[in-house]
């Protein structure tokens, strides 16, 4: 396997004449793809009703999309060599667009899941290629601005998704959350074919070998891993025999995949992904930080609407609307990053962003059921601002020591691991809520005793109020049930608070890793 080495001066020679114009189709494609990852969340009950499916069955509409995208992401470097990167990017947009139209026309659950797999397969190739293109389109001293613009789509779009999805579902019907992708996808495909530049190292290569064994191991590993994360909590994790076997099978295929790639690399053959990129310390550390950040981001996006709906009584639309301050904060952070990213020390920016994310999550961990709206809006905005402030420079730091030829492969690996990180975060938060609620219920249930004067007084007062409607015995039982319901509500509240605190402290714990980077100011 031979790699043509191109110097930095030669790389600058291939830069597009008008890079910001070339970025237009990239951002259109990315915003549409990332938006579709969350826009369907609030429409799931409507889709389940249309297909006569249960809530658990409807979750496959989300899961199939993630699985298909996760499988394609690490294969991006291979397909870019096979078709040419520009051609593969355009093909991915077209496949995503056609699949979006088919999703809107689905008549049953089987069709919907199949079309979502096609949609995820088309969209999976967009994110890593777009990240590589945004970095390669600018000289190294201007990449901070380009990644700030890229981050607007990656961070803001999933936050806006539930609000937009709720509005479209309430005012039109759920198929329109897919139909709106069609005109945007067509415009993005045409513009990408016309505007994207095609340097020599990103063009179609001859005699590209297909790593079929590696691809098979990859499919089996990621598909079973996603099912493990999605269904593990409902099946009580390793207490279920099929979960244990599924986990062993997934780990075995994951090990076989990485071993097959290392063997091909050692034989100087063409692997599906080039793992030698992990020799770069900045890339490895930066990728790890992004994986944990993605876990926190997806977990908090999943947990906050649940808290507002289940504990505070918000509607689906209002709970989605509550995420808007996070989008405002992220947008503000991106604008600031665009101006200072190439001037300030990137390590300090990431440190400040992680601290703000952690502080906002810890603040959410001290809420109660008598809070005002500002108590939700303020930490939400702070978390969005911190996410933007950390995500933009950490992408730049992790890629700063790589050449342009390595960008596509590195972006594919990085986005694969971030995708897995998001799945882990979503699964962890579901497990935290279940287990922590049980722990706190066990700790408090001893207080529900007649030996506790406060409990006895409240039961007596409630029973006295109910006696005018029923018999004394029934009123007594109803009063005890009311107190037990209060205990369940409080134990669930504690579970939410504990989860927020853990994810907040996890962000702050990442800060010492920034010492492993060299000074993060751009070399321009």
Image: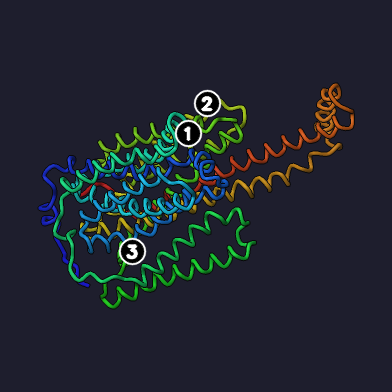
Q: Nearer the viewer, residue 52 or 8?
A: 52
470 displayed left or right of 162: right
Residue drawn at 16 percent across, 43 percent down: 19
Residue at the extreme front = 107
Structural crowding at the residue carrying mark 1, measured as other residues with C-alpha within 10 Å and reported as few (<14), some (14–19) or many (≥20): many
Answer with the quarter of the image where residue 272 lies.
bottom left
- In what quadrant of the picture does the N terminus appear? bottom left
Q: Which residue is mark 1?
A: 320
31 displayed left or right of 462: left
Q: Is residue 78 visible?
A: yes
Residue 278: mark = 3
Q: Which residue is mark 2?
A: 373
Structural crowding at the residue carrying mark 3, measured as other residues with C-alpha within 10 Å and reported as few (<14), some (14–19) or many (≥20): some
Q: Is residue 391 visible?
A: no
Which percent across, then down, holds residue 130?
Answer: 27, 49
Residue drawn at 49 percent across, 62 percent down: 224
């Amino acid at each position: 396997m031979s790699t043509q080495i191109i110097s930095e001066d030669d790389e600058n020679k291939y830069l597009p004449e008008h890079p910001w114009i070339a970025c237009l189709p990239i951002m259109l494609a990315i915003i549409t793809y990332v938006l579709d990852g969350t826009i369907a969340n609030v429409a799931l009950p409507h889709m389940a009703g249309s297909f006569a499916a249960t809530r658990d069955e409807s979750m496959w509409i989300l899961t199939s999309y993630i699985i298909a995208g996760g499988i394609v992401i690490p294969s991006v470097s291979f397909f870019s060599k096979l078709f040419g990167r520009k051609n593969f990017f355009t093909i991915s947009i077209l496949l995503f667009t056609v699949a979006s139209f088919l999703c809107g026309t689905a008549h049953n659950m089987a069709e919907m899941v199949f079309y979502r797999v096609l949609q995820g397969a088309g969209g999976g190739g967009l994110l890593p290629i777009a990240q590589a293109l945004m970095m390669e389109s600018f000289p190294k001293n201007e990449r901070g601005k380009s990644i700030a613009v890229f981050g607007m789509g990656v961070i803001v779009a999933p936050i806006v998704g539930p609000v937009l999805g709720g509005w479209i579902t309430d005012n039109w019907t759920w198929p329109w959350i897919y139909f709106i992708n069609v005109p945007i996808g067509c415009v993005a495909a045409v513009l990408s074919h016309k505007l994207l530049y095609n340097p020599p190292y990103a063009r179609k290569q001859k005699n590209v070998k297909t790593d079929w064994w590696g691809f098979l191991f990859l499919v089996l590993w990621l598909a079973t891993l996603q099912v493990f994360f999605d269904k593990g909590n409902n099946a009580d994790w390793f207490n279920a025999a099929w979960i244990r076997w599924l986990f062993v099978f997934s780990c075995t295929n994951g090990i076989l995949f990485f071993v097959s790639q290392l063997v091909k690399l050692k034989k100087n053959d063409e692997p599906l992904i080039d793992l030698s990129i992990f020799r770069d310390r900045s890339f490895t550390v930066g990728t790890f930080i992004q994986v944990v950040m993605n876990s926190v981001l997806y977990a908090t996006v999943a947990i906050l609407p649940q808290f507002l709906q289940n504990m505070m009584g918000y509607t689906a639309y209002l709970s989605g609307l509550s995420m808007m301050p996070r989008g405002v904060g992220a947008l503000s952070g991106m604008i600031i990053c665009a101006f200072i990213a190439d001037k300030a020390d990137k390590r300090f920016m990431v440190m400040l962003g992680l601290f703000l994310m952690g502080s906002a999550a810890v603040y959410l961990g001290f809420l109660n059921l008598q809070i005002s709206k500002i108590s939700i809006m303020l930490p939400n905005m702070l978390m969005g601002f911190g996410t933007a402030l950390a995500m933009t420079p950490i992408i730049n730091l992790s890629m700063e020591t790589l050449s342009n030829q390595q960008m596509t492969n590195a972006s594919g690996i990085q986005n694969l691991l971030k995708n897995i990180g998001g799945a882990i975060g979503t699964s962890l938060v579901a497990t935290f809520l279940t287990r922590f609620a049980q722990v706190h219920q066990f700790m408090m249930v001893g207080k529900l005793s007649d030996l506790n004067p406060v409990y006895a007084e409240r039961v007596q007062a409630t029973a006295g109020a109910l006696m005018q409607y029923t018999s004394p015995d029934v009123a007594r039982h109803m009063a005890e049930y009311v107190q037990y319901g209060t205990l369940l509500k409080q134990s669930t509240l504690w579970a939410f608070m504990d989860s927020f605190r853990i994810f907040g402290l996890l962000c702050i714990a990442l800060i010492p890793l920034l010492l492993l980077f060299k000074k993060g100011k751009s070399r321009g």
